[in-house]
């Protein structure tokens, strides 16, 4: 959202139609100013260059609106098939589970907590300190009260904290399957085991980890259980627009018991179907088609290949960090690594001057690198050369000889 006044700009509303060439030129100029994933210089984003065909094949769906499903039975069928794929990937039971395409992790988390509140009639949510800020938005919108659970130094929620905070007022507990800052995966099996017999809902935010964790076993031989295989997991959100190869915006919310979605349905008498589910009215069919296309064209082997490469590069950054005296905060389990640094903002700024986008983390202090599919071996090599120079020069400035 932009306030032109703050930007100092002053533009009158177009009085007459502009020519195609003029508009094209203006858009092209704006695009040149934007960062391009394909240069491999973005390490601070969980989004990436989508599969080109996914975008292209979905283009004809641009005008269709899945929010009025009676007019697009074909897209509805694609969404059903897509949801069936995801429910299978995340080990949902064969009967009763369901899901819907959303715009991303924010909508996924808002919708999950909306359902949790309406189904349970309760008002408190136990939230790990590591949760993404979209959860804070959801709590505010839904007038839910957070009970913040502390995390351990390596970023995973403390199970004893969750146990202490859960009460008869708890609508849901949130767990992270790949936290935004550290890439940490909470002890979801323990949480599930403790919460399930107590009938307390467990929502897993797998926005980032959802297209990583299912493929780890093929690479590492072990995995980190996080999904519906664990009986206590009641809902799960995942973002195909992060590691799924889908264009933005694309998310999915999956429920163990799809009946619960009734709790957020509203009457929509003038549409082709009398009940509307979810936050938005208009829902772009293009998101369904492009996500469908991306997943179909990647397949399990495609995701494994993508992840193997990303993990190798992540470990290369961690190794170089060790050599530079800025070791990783935690051994990376996903394609995200944070290197400890006393003054990450300074390094971030200096790297930005050299054309690199990296994030600075305040707690614990560190430099965060997300190795998304657009990052290449060559760009990592180049980035590490600049990082070495910057880290060493900052050190000399701190301790002048
Ligand atoms: N849950 C988790 C674990 C997330 O990391 C994110 C976003 C969300 C939910 C919310 O997802 P949407 O933004 O799709 O609604 N993670 C990234 C972040 O905030 C998003 C991002 C993308 C940040 C591009 C920066 C950037 O350049 O870190």
Image: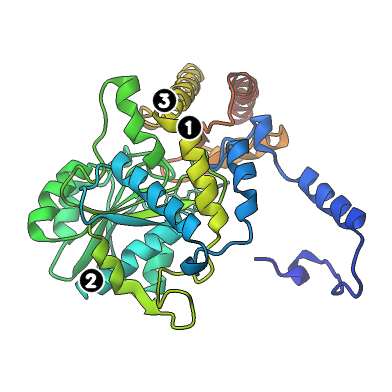
Farthest residue to the top: give it: 323
Q: What crowding class fits label 2: few (fewer than 14 Cα within 10 Å), some (14-19), or many (20 or more)? A: some
Q: What crowding class fits label 3: few (fewer than 14 Cα within 10 Å), some (14-19), or many (20 or more)? A: few
Q: Which residue is mark 3?
A: 301
Q: Which residue is mark 1?
A: 298
Point out residue 53 in the picture as x, y percentages from the top left corner. Answer: 61, 37
Task: For marks 3 and 2, give the one nearer the viewer.
Answer: 3
Q: How many marks?
A: 3
* Left or right of 270, for residue 226: left
Where residue 90 sits, quadrant-wise, is top left
Assess mark 2: CB under 8 A from ligand 1?
no
Task: For marks 1 and 2, give the one nearer the viewer.
Answer: 1
- Residue placed most toward the observer, 137 or 391: 137
* Left or right of 16, for residue 123: left
How far apart, in angstroms, are the residues tagged by discs 3 and 1?
Answer: 7 Å
Q: Identify the mark at residue 119; answer none if there is no mark.
A: 2
Q: First in sequence: mark 1 or mark 2? A: 2
Q: Identify the mark at residue 283; answer none if there is no mark.
A: none
Q: Is residue 335 visible?
A: no
Point out residue 108 in the picture as x, y percentages from the top left corner. Answer: 40, 58
How far apart, in angstroms, are the residues tagged by discs 1 and 2?
Answer: 36 Å
Residue at coordinates 50% horizontally, 18% vertically from top-left?
320
Are the residues at dot 1 and dot 2 in contact (C-beta closer than 8 Å)? no
């Amino acid at each position: 959202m932009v306030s032109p006044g703050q930007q100092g700009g002053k533009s009158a509303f177009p009085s007459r139609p502009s020519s195609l060439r003029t508009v094209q030129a203006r858009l092209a100029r704006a695009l040149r100013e934007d960062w391009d994933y394909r240069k491999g210089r973005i390490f601070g984003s969980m989004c990436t260059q989508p599969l080109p065909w996914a975008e292209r094949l979905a283009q004809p769906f641009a005008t269709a609106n899945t929010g009025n499903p009676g007019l697009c039975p074909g897209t509805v069928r694609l969404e059903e098939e897509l949801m069936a794929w995801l429910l299978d990937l995340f080990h949902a039971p064969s009967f009763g589970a369901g899901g819907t395409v959303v715009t991303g992790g924010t909508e996924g988390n808002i919708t999950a907590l909306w359902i949790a509140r309406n189904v349970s009639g309760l008002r408190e949510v136990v939230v790990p300190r590591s949760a993404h800020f979209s959860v804070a938005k959801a709590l505010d919108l839904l007038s839910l009260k957070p009970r913040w659970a502390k995390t351990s130094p390596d970023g995973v929620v403390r199970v004893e904290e969750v146990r202490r905070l859960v009460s008869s007022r708890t609508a849901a507990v949130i767990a992270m399957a790949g936290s935004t800052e550290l890439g940490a995966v909470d002890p979801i099996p323990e949480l599930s085991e403790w919460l399930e017999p107590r009938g307390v809902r467990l929502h897993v935010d797998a926005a980032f980890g959802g297209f990583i964790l299912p493929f780890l076993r093929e690479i590492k031989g072990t995995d980190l259980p996080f999904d519906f295989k664990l009986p206590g997991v009641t809902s799960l959100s995942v973002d195909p627009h992060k590691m799924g190869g889908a264009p933005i915006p694309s998310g999915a919310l999956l429920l163990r018991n799809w009946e619960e979605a009734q709790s957020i349905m509203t009457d929509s008498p003038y549409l082709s179907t009398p009940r509307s589910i979810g936050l938005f009215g208009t829902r772009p069919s293009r998101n369904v088609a492009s996500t469908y296309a991306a997943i179909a064209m990647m397949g399990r082997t495609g995701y494994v290949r993508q992840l193997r490469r990303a993990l190798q590069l992540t470990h290369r950054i961690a190794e170089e960090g060790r050599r530079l005296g800025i070791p990783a905060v935690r051994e990376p389990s996903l394609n995200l690594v944070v290197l400890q640094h006393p003054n990450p903002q300074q390094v971030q700024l200096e790297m930005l001057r050299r054309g690199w986008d990296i994030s600075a983390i305040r707690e614990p202090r560190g430099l965060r690198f997300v190795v998304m599919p657009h990052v290449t071996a060559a760009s990592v090599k180049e980035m590490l050369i600049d990082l070495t120079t910057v880290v060493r020069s900052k050190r000399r400035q701190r301790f002048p000889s």
